[in-house]
Image: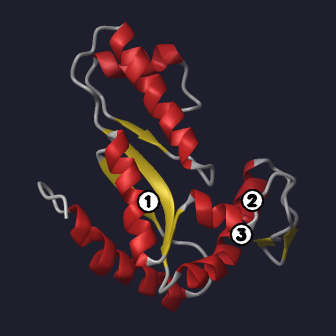
């Protein structure tokens, strides 16, 4: 959404399209800003039914907040590689982009605060913020890092300990 002009957003809203935002590793305030922009544009072009808004967010559900903080090191590596490839700044060795730091990278603590990351209870609280804002679809991005078992454990915790709080039609 951020890369789209207001005219493009207006065009999409007038045709009844739903919208997706991917705020990378930025704070929740970026999503709030996107939501506000979309609602302002919708009102300006006479769209009375709010569009469905989706967010794709890096998510890690740890056993505890401390466990999730440790996992943020993998997200830092993923961010470094992606950012350098995206900016055409990657150094490649043996066919793999090196995970060299980038100027604007977030600390592990910032990542933990910004992403849907933490203990199951923390993740429920964070997803509730999206729900309260009016985000109707949450797309979990959980494929990062080399530790497949850790990724699967996070996905399992999300399915078993976070998702049940968001069953359609209920607010538990």
Are the residues tagged 2 and 3 within 8 Å (C-beta)?
A: yes
Residue 135 at least partly seen: no
Along the polypeptide, which appears first: circle 3 or circle 1? 3
Q: Is residue 126 above or below residue 71?
A: above
- Pinpoint residue 156: horizontal percent, then vertical percent: 35, 83
Colour scheme in use: secondary structure
Q: Which residue is mark 1?
A: 126
| Residue 48 picture quarter | top left
**Mark 2 to mark 3: distance in Å?**
7 Å
Q: Which residue is mark 3?
A: 108
The residue drawn where x is 58% and y is 85% is 67
Q: Is residue 61 above or below residue 51?
A: below
The residue drawn where x is 42% and y is 17% is 40
* Label 3, residues with CA under 10 Å away: few <14, some 14-19, many ≥20: some
Q: Which residue is mark 2?
A: 106
* Label 1, residues with CA under 10 Å away: few <14, some 14-19, many ≥20: some
In front here: 77 or 131? 131
Q: Is residue 107 left or right of residue 30?
A: right
Q: Is residue 98 left or right of residue 44?
A: right
């Amino acid at each position: 959404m951020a890369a789209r002009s207001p005219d493009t957003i207006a065009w999409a809203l007038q045709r009844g399209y739903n919208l997706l935002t991917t705020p990378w590793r930025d704070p929740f305030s970026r999503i709030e800003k996107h939501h506000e922009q979309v609602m302002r544009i919708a009102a300006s072009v006479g769209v009375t039914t709010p569009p469905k808004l989706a967010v794709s967010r890096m998510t890690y559900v740890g056993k505890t907040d401390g466990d999730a903080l440790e996992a943020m090191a993998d997200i830092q590596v993923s961010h470094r590689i992606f950012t350098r490839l995206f900016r055409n700044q990657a150094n490649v060795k043996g066919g793999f982009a090196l995970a060299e730091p980038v100027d604007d990278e977030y600390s592990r603590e910032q990542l933990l605060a910004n992403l849907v990351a933490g203990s199951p209870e923390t993740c429920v609280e964070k997803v509730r913020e999206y729900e309260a804002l009016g985000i109707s679809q949450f797309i979990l991005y959980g494929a990062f890092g080399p530790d497949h078992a850790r990724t699967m454990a996070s996905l399992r915790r999300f399915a078993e300990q976070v998702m049940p709080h968001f069953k359609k039609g209920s607010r538990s």
